[in-house]
Image: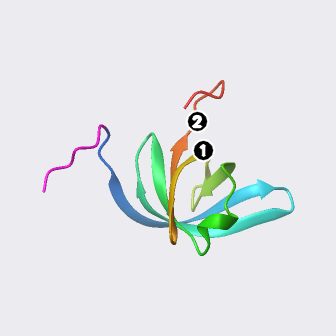
Amino acid sequence: MSEYRSVPRRQTLRHAEIIISAALAFTCSVGNLTDAGALLLVRSESAIPDAFELTIGPCDDRHACRVIWRRPGEVGVSFERAGGEI
């Protein structure tokens, strides 16, 4: 089966943290990753807001994220660029 996406995805199972505020964060796993976004594996997709900061370990890579789609246990996000552009 061919890959029809404009950006190829790299499969991974890295631990990450969805940061909502200084007092609220959720752990998750990154299922796949590109320079433009990621697939996040979460316990409850409905608890994740439309925009948040994502920290991907162990290097603590940080990304401002916007939710593009939701499925049970999964959230697809795009990484925002400087200036708020997606």
Q: Amino acid at mark 1?
A: Arg
Q: Is residue 5 magenta?
A: yes
- Label 1: which residue? 66
Which class describes the residues within 10 Å of circle 1: few (<14), some (14-19), or many (20+)? Answer: many
Nearest the camera: 73 or 52?
Answer: 73
The answer to whether residue 22 is above or below residue 73 is: above
- Where is residue 57? Give x, y as percent: 58, 61
Spatial distance from mark 1 to mark 2, Cα to Cα?
Answer: 7 Å
The chief SS type of the magenta part is loop
Instruction: Check if mark 1's residue and mark 2's residue have beta carbons within 8 Å.
Output: yes
The image shows residue 5, relative to residue 20, as above or below, that is above
Compared with 21, 6 (above or below) is: above
Residue 51 location in percent, x, y?
Answer: 67, 47
In the image shown, does 47 or 11 lie closer to the viewer?
Answer: 47
> Where in the figure is residue 50, as x and y percent of width and height?
66, 49
- The residue labelled by disc 2 is 80
Quick check: is 3 in the magenta stretch? yes
The quadrant where residue 64 appears: top right
